[in-house]
Image: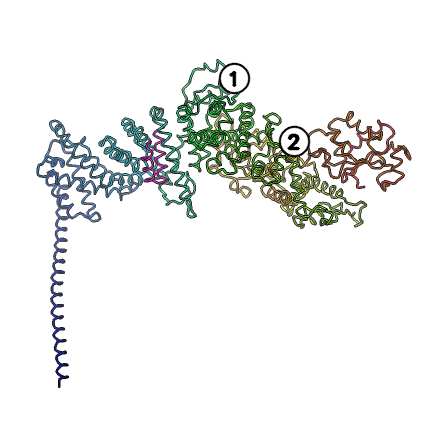
Amino acid sequence: MFSASQCSRAQFLDRARQAREERRELKERERAAVQLQALARRFLCRCRLHRDIRREVEDFFGTNECGSSKRSALSVFRIARKLLFVFNPKEDKERFEKLCRCILNSMDVENEPKVWYVSLALSKDLTLLWIKQIKDILWFCCEFLKQLKPDILQDSRLVNLHLTMLITFTDTSTWKILRGKGETLRPAMNHICANIMGHLNQKGFYSVLQILLTNGLARSRPSLSKGSLTAIFSLALRPVVAAQFSDNLLRSFLIHIMSVPAIMTHLATLTPERLAVIESHDLFRKFILFLSREEQCRDVCVCLEGSHTLCLLGNLVFLGSLNDQVLEEETAHFVGVLIHMLSYCQKYVSQKKSNLTHWHPVLGWFSQTVDYGLNESMPLLTKQLQHLWGVHMIRILFSDVLSKKLLENQEIAQLPAQPVSPQNSLPMKNLFKRAFQKSASVRNILKPVGGKRVDSAEVQKVCSICVLYQTTLTTLTQIRLQILTGLTYLDDLLPKLWAFICELGPQGGLKLFLECLNNDTEESKRLLAMLMLFCDCSRHLITILDDIEVYEEQISFKLEELVTISSFLNSFVFKMIWDGIVENARGETLELFHSVHGWLMVLYERDCRRRFAPDEHWLRKDLKPNVLFQELDKDKKRAQLLLQYIPHVIPHKNRVLLFRNMVTKEKEKLGLVETSSASPHVTHITIRRSRMLEDGYEQLRQLSQNAMKGVIRVKFVNDLGVDEAGIDQDGVFKEFLEEIIKKVFDPALNLFKTTSGDERLYPSPTSYIHENYLQLFEFVGKMLGKAVYEGIVVDVPFASFFLSQLLGHHHSVFYSSVDELPSLDSEFYKNLTSIKRYDGDISDLGLTLSYDEDVMGQTAVYSSAGKFGPAWICLGAATLEMHLQRISYIHLMAHFRMHTQIKSQTAALIGGFRSIIKPEWIRMFSAPELQRLISGDNAEIDLEDLKKHTVYYGGFHGSHRVIIWLWDILANDFSPEERAMFLKFVTSCSRPPLLGFAYLKPPFSIRCVEVSDDQDTGDTLGSVLRGFFTIRKKEPGGRLPTSSTCFNLLKLPNYSKKSILREKLRYAISMNTGFELS
């Protein structure tokens, strides 16, 4: 009973709780319904109100448009207030446009103050409301300007409308209310305009103008009209002028306006009167002085980041080119600002380098957001930057250097000054050139003299300018060649800069700059930057000048000055290496080294091609070769660096010895030298004399690299397969190698051609007619390398340009194809360089970007469109019309003839050569020295050396009368040419070995013979005794001397008279008899 009562009570309580919850939920639903109804009614009410207001606005403007009645300012104010209350940019765009036109129309009405919208500013009750309203309207104009695209016609009209609104209400000059008696109100109205402008600035007015300018100007062709650009720039200037050029507004102007790509160029083109306004306010000076404070400049650069900092830089440089007076007065500040901005760009690029990089047409590769508009305006920006290295600005900045006189001749010194112009600059240049040619003593040879304090204001100024241009070169990497060309345009800048360098320090020259290397001061860095700039520019100049300009016309530098400069550079680089500075060099010091070394090597290679320096000019007398070799054996870093960078300071003979030592060490390492405990592996090959090239190619091309470097024994067989007599103790292989080389380099085979004139060899462009011609060239390279490896001299005269390629010089950034062209075709070189000197219209010559050549009876046309010319660069037109393209034309033509045509052949030959000879072994030689390494010394034959290292057989000895006659005939009766023919008769090469006859392998030998070669069975006891005692079986007067070139052996009959020996020997060497195998 009790249990049932408890259960019913629980149910009752549960039902009561559920009933309460249902009542509460009902109340909540009723309250929510009321709220929703209220929100809906409010929303609908607001929509009706907005609709009514918009209808009222439309009715207002519709009536205004249909009727000619003028609306009062108060009615416009009220309707504007309503529109602004409901304003939505998307819905009310057209209504806002009508409002703006209505307001502007009211301002144009004559003599009706109540119509003028601005008149409400004078109403005591409405002033504050009107000010707030016009602020809102003008800011909405700014918001629209951010979205508009000036290149679209409709948007362009709206841009003009909104700009007119901003122009009208941020300055009182057009307000008719202030005319006449209203002039007293101007201060108050100006204050209102300043208030409005201040409000806009706080909201981001300059950002709006920047976006508009960028949309309209950052493109290949500007889309902003002259009026729009004038309005925008006027608006941008107003806050700055009103605030009396305060730092804050100057900063905003620089960041947002002056950083717009090439805006100054567009102003100069579209609205030049704005530049006059800039000049009237002396804005350029104010910009420079503001940015000259390091913290301000850093702040501006950080805000702009890399590319836009460069745009600001370009605009400042352009302004500087138009303000000579300010530039001269503020040179130090101008230079300092540019250095800081360029350094920031350089640092920015280095920090942004990553795997996700994009190419910038001026700064190079770094991680950046792709701004296509900015990229489109880069050509204009580059043109702005070009003013920095243009003649005009260089004359201003380097005025202290250029004012120095290098002339002694009074007539030239008193020449009347002429204004610099494109019309008279060339005649003046030619006049000075002729004056230099007439008098060899016109100019003092510039040598280090010293005497100028390095802490003087003049030196510091010049150093700063050099730092500027050096920073420009290292920052604007993609237009580096343009910069160097601009800096070298003035012929007298570099010699005068060298004269300035010569005057620095107590003694001038080397000592000062070596001290700077050890001083980590700002002054030292500036001095080294000056040296670095001088080296970079001079290297560029000498690289682009041809031999006529360097040696005959002596443009910029006299040859004697090049000797002095090269001596300075040689000593400077040597000291940097030998004193251990290069070992630990980093950053700027390493860049300096490469700069000085690059200029040095350009001079050295020029001297190797055509001498201008005296004998032993490049050697270092204080460097002992034995000391160097000892350090190389100990792997000392400085010795290795010396050999890597300036091997020419070591005498040539010592370098050849070093080369031979390197080869010997490698042979020992590879086990190719016979020792007491082991013999080297020997490769045996069988060669048919009638098919020597084919058999040699087939058997040797399959050998491994080490086998090719090892001992190769040759056995000759005749066509019947019968072995020839003779044992190869290196002699037969020597003959085989010489014969192979003679065959492959024979121009008749068409693997190689000879140059016109001196008939030197280079790969034939038409060698592709041979089957497997690239494998043949690789084989030739191996044979040539084997000859050099074994010290076998071969009489193969190569063209200089081909030797340069063999050394790898053509990969150097300093290499000039034009300089090497005379070694291929001197007549073609003269014709090409005459194009450079042609004073008429270059298009008259009818030059095309193609090259026609007779190839096996057919004319082959090499061009950018043809199958032969993928590496030919098209300059953009079929006919070479642009004057500035001629230099590119000349270099492209030279490069095509010497590289493109024979690229694959050269690569194959070099590959084969380097499989035997390591590239680093021959890098210590110049092109002429490499030729001597291959073909022997081009000096006269040293008979005493030859006599000292001659071996005698068959009874001959040094005191034998025939031998005494022989040496006397060679010394006194034979000409140098005949002595060379004699050497070639015996050894197959007309040149002596580089290190003398002690290094001739096999050694030079003379053997007494009694019978003809086909009856000769070698020395016997009887033949030796007869030869020794001068006993003859019969008179050998009818027989000629013969030779075995494979053994370097002269076979000489025991003649009875000296005259017979002279006659027979002269005949034998002239007829080139002999070359038999003993």
Position of 360 with respect to 745 (left or right) is left
Q: Main secondary structure of the magenta part?
A: helix
Q: Is residue 69 visible?
A: no
Furthest toward the bottom, the residue is 1
Q: Position of residue 185 (x, y in %)?
A: 12, 30
Q: Position of residue 615 (x, y in %)?
A: 62, 26
Q: Work out which quarter of the rendered image holds the N terminus and state it.
A: bottom left
Q: Give whichever of 133, 285 is nearer the camera.
A: 285
The reply to whether the magenta stretch includes residue 316 is yes
Q: Is residue 121 visible?
A: yes
The quarter holding residue 124 reads top left
- Per the image, label 2 sits on a secondary structure element best described as loop
Q: Which residue is label 2 attached to?
A: 758
- Per the image, label 1 sits on a secondary structure element best described as loop
User: On screen, 630 above or below 13?
Assistant: above
Q: Residues within 10 Å of mark 2 (few under 14, many from 20)?
A: few
Name the residue located 9 percent from the left edge and 36 percent from the top edge: 123
Residue 442, disc: 1
Position of 523 with respect to 926 (left or right) is left
Position of 986 with respect to 821 (left or right) is right
Q: Amino acid at mark 1?
A: Val
Residues shaded magenta = 292-320
Q: Earlier in the sequence, mark 1 or mark 2?
A: 1
